[in-house]
Image: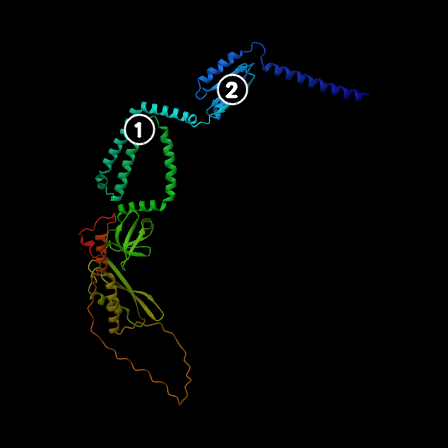
Amino acid sequence: MRHWLQLVLAIWIVGYGSALALQADDEQLAGEIKVQNAPQDQAIAARLRAITASLSGLENVEISVNAGVITLQGEVANTQLKNDMTAIASRLEGVVHVQNQLQEQLAVRSRLAPAAEKFREMLGTTVQMLPLLVLAVLAVVLFWLVGSWLSNRSALLRRLGLSELATNLGMRFVRLIITSIGILIALELLDATALVTALLGIAGVIGIALGFAFRNIVENYLAGVLLSTRNPFAIGDFIQVDNFTGKVIRLTSRDTVLMTFDGNHLRIPNSQIITSPMLNFSRNPLRRFEFTVGVSADLDLLVVRQLAITTLQAMPGILAEPRPRVLVQELGDSSVTVQVMAWVDQRDTDFLKARSEAIRLVKTTFDNAGIEMPEPIYRILMVDTLTKDEEKPSSPATPEVVIQAEPAVDVSTDDCIEQQFQQELNKSDEENLLPAVSDDPLAKGRN
């Protein structure tokens, strides 16, 4: 019996709570719509018409109010105005509901009307700012003219020892800075300094993109500036970069042009020349050649040394100072390697010819003196298989040696490449960042 009483009590409590909740909801709904002192429909309509009259694009809206229910009819320019009208009407005091029956304007003329209005406003603003626009344009033109005038005054930078390419780059940088100052002043006059931040951001992004896209071109250009400033070589210098050798024809903003000994044109990127070891054989007109000779280990090396030195000293084109030298380089199993060195003046003597003639004369002198230049010795065991009745073949007769007269030694400079080099300099119109060849005798006869 007690359990039944508890169940009935629980059901009553739940029912009583639901009744109280329904009563509270009814009171709340009743409080949302004011029955007493509610604004009149005419007052709501007048207030809403006053609001629409002050907003652009709502001139064709028809408003009617009945018992707090607003009905909107007519045409608006776009969906945004339609939604805004609903939000405004629902916020008025005394409004129960809003019936939005507005239609969007589909005529081209009505669609272009807002744009035409904005254009008229911009035109009016432009007319008002016309004096400032004229001042801004004059500021940009004035600063551009000043920058151009200063960019043509490159004598100061040249006095500092800068090259032509570095001077041109510096002048362009000066002109860019001065023109940028004029643009900033113009934007300040137009009260558009916020545009500068946007332009700088865009320029930064574009600069990064161009930097990655033209990285090799920028590297070669900057390397050309450094080469033209440092001047590690001049026109006509014989240089070696990595495994490439040739005479320098010109230096451009992107690459260096060489003429090889076989008459071909070789273009090496400037960045490779900057980052690679380079030999300049023409900066010092004196150059040493060397070669090695193998002689018998039984000979007196002092005699061999003196004989080679005497031969080189008597050879045309070999300098007396620095004197020729002969050094013992290596002691082998059956021979001794001797290193022969001598100096030549490249302005008067061809390096390759002198080295070739020196090798020939030293060999001839050693042959005449009976100095052997032994070949590698191999021990071979021979087994005699001949019978007593067989005879061994006779050895071949020694050929007769014919001694000819010693030809004249020619170590003069080879002008074949030099002629082609001069023709290339005279006929080419390509830019050359290197200074022209002077009349200094050190600049002549380089090879």
Residue placed farthest to the top in the image?
37
Q: Amino acid at mark 2?
A: Leu
Q: What residue appears at the point 54 percent right and 20 percent down from the top-left corner?
A: 99
Camera-side residue of 351 and 430: 430
Relative height, residue 270 to residue 333 (above, below): above
Q: What residue appears at the point 21 percent right and 40 percent down from the top-left corner?
A: 155
Residue 65 is at least partly visible in this image: yes
Count of all numbered marks drawn on residues in the image: 2
Camera-side residue of 302 and 330: 330
Relative height, residue 157 to residue 194 (above, below): below
Image-quadrant location for residue 176 = top left
Q: Residues within 10 Å of mark 1 (few under 14, many from 20)?
A: many
Q: Quadrant of the N terminus?
A: top right
Residue 308 in the image, given as x and y percentages of width and height: 25, 67
Nearer to us of marks 2 and 1 is 2
Side of 158 where 20 appears, left or right: right
Residue 175 in the image, given as x and y percentages of width and height: 27, 36
Relative height, residue 125 to residue 382 (above, below): above
Residue 163 is at least partly visible in this image: no
Side of 219 where 13 appears, left or right: right
Q: Amino acid at mark 1?
A: Ala
Dot 2: element: strand
Q: What residue is shown with label 1?
A: 186
Side of 30 where 197 appears, left or right: left
Dot 1: element: helix
Residue 392 in the image, given as x and y percentages of width and height: 37, 86
**Mark positioned earlier in the residue sequence (2 or 1):** 2
Q: Quadrant of the C terminus?
A: bottom left
Image-quadrant location for residue 3 = top right
Q: What residue is shown with label 2?
A: 72
Camera-side residue of 333 and 136: 136
